[in-house]
Amino acid sequence: LCWSPEGLQLFASSRASPSKVLTHAFARACLHSSPMQTKLDQATLLKAPAACLLGDDRVLCVYGSDVVGNAEKPVLQHLMLPQSYVAANWPMRDLAMSQCGADIA
């Protein structure tokens, strides 16, 4: 049992087959990743993520409602980062979002 260097993956070996390694991926919250500075109306809940999480190879965006505006069913969207970018810039450390939530960098 051990963590990856950045703590976003946990590696564990199987008791039944010690040569088999299981990988569990995690994501971390990014400070200041929530653009929700304005009032929350239905249009805002549909367009801008309420929060973003940064994983090893992806950004996870949490929207406050589903596509029909049901706030009881938040949506999690996986934005996969290009493998060439991840290879050149690993580990991902920062995430920035425009105030309206439309642009993520």
Image: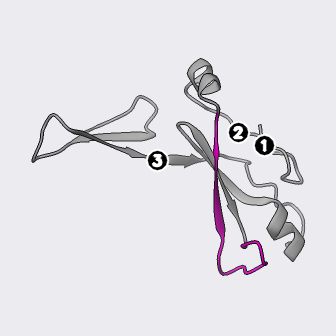
Any magenta on residue 75?
Answer: yes
Coordinates of residue 74 in the picture (x, y in percent): 66, 71
* Label 2: element kind: loop
Please name the residue that numbered disc 1 is placed on.
104
The circle drawn on residue 13 is none
Q: CA distance from mark 3 to mark 2?
A: 16 Å
Which quarter of the figure has residue 10? top left
Q: Residues within 10 Å of mark 2 (few under 14, many from 20)?
A: some
Please name the residue that numbered disc 3 is placed on.
26
- Residue drawn at x 78%, y 78% is 68
Note whether residue 48 is visible.
yes
- Residue drawn at x 85%, y 72% is 40
Q: CA distance from mark 3 to mark 1?
A: 20 Å
Left or right of 87 in this view: 70: right
Coordinates of residue 21 in the picture (x, y in percent): 24, 38
Please name the residue that numbered disc 2 is placed on.
95
Q: Three-letter amino acid code at disc 3?
A: Phe
CB within 8 Å, label 2 to label 1 = yes
Q: CA distance from mark 2 to mark 1?
A: 7 Å
Q: Three-letter amino acid code at disc 1?
A: Ile
Residue segment shown in magenta = 65-81
Left or right of 53 in this view: 100: right
